[in-house]
Amino acid sequence: MNASELRTGNKAGLMQGKLCLVTGANSGIGKSTALGLAGLGATVVLACRDAERGEAAKRDIIKGSNNQDVSLSLVDLANLDSVHSFANDFQHKFSRLDVLVNNAGIYSSKRVVTVDGFESTFAINHLAHFLLTNLLLELLKASAPSRIVNVSSEAQSRGHINFSDLQGQRKYSGWKSYPQSKLANVLFTYELARRLKGTGVTVNCVHPGGVRTNFGRKNGGLMGVAVKAFAPFMLSPEGGAKTVIWLASSPELEHVTGKYFAKQSELKSSRESYDLEVARQLWEVSSELVGLAHP
């Protein structure tokens, strides 16, 4: 789905007057999602860590969508103070938020610790988006009907929330940490949907498919080898963004919430993802780690 396709037919102007925020929007699925939403007429805010790459993406998206209403805001998801500052600045600058796409994510073959002392995969893929979403919830509620789209992965099916070693302090494996973080995305989606019932804010999660991006390429070991080997058979970033854009914009999904999607179809996620006790405990632990009060 490219920008010219989005601007044609009855989809032209579908998101006119809507404000969308996309994390990790300087490349890959995030950039293609931002381009697609801009192509539908939305005002789009790119949440990126790197200013130079973010500005380059902004120029590309404006050119590709023929939409000038694209802006860049900097945030380092590996730093919770940066997430707080970003959310605060965003709410001062914008009076509404119609769509939040939590897209940014990493895979790390080695255990890396953030400035806050958290394992980086868990911190960036889950904790940062958990915090950001909660900080922006009142704005999303005030803008209802509004939507949250969490980009997960089929890897969630292999994940397990290991509360006894949540951040791999005793034994770290990228092959376990990444699926755990993607399962956390799904559990967060389902729990948040339950908590937002009746507010007009929907929240869904998506497996975008195996996408040909820079994800995992910088890692050594099996992940780096696998990503390079399978790249010719993987989806383009545009292909991977299709379901994300659909979840963010389709009128038929206005009241759909608490679901897991792939290829524009609802799917069942892993058995553990439906465990209410695991979801409750993850919410409480996450709230404590990021410094949020929880009911």
Image: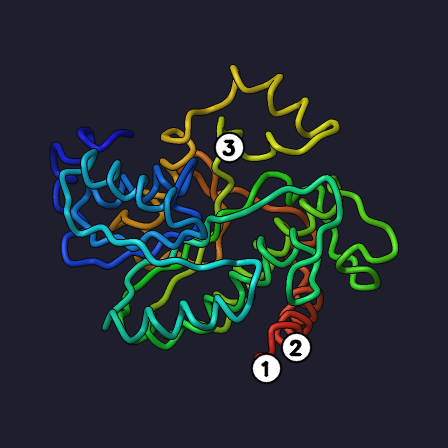
Residue found at the very far right of the displayed protein: 170
* Amino acid type at image mark 2: Glu
In this rendered view, identify the residue nearer to me: 111 or 268: 111
Residue occupied by mark 2? 288
Q: Residue at x 59, y 63 (%)?
A: 127
Q: Examine the rendered structure and indicate whether residue 262 appears above or below residue 71.
A: above
Residue 236 located left or right of residue 8: right
For discs 2 and 1, the disc positioned in front in the rendered view: 2
Residue 24 located left or right of residue 224: left
Q: Residue at x 45, y 52 (%)?
A: 49
* Amino acid type at image mark 1: His
Q: Quadrant of the N terminus?
A: top left
Q: Spatial distance from mark 2 to mark 3, Cα to Cα?
A: 32 Å
Marks 2 and 1 close (CB-CB < 8 Å): yes
Residue occupied by mark 1? 294
Q: Measuring from the top left, give residue 61's x and y in whole percent.
A: 25, 39
Residue occupied by mark 3? 209
Callout 2: helix, strand or loop? Answer: helix
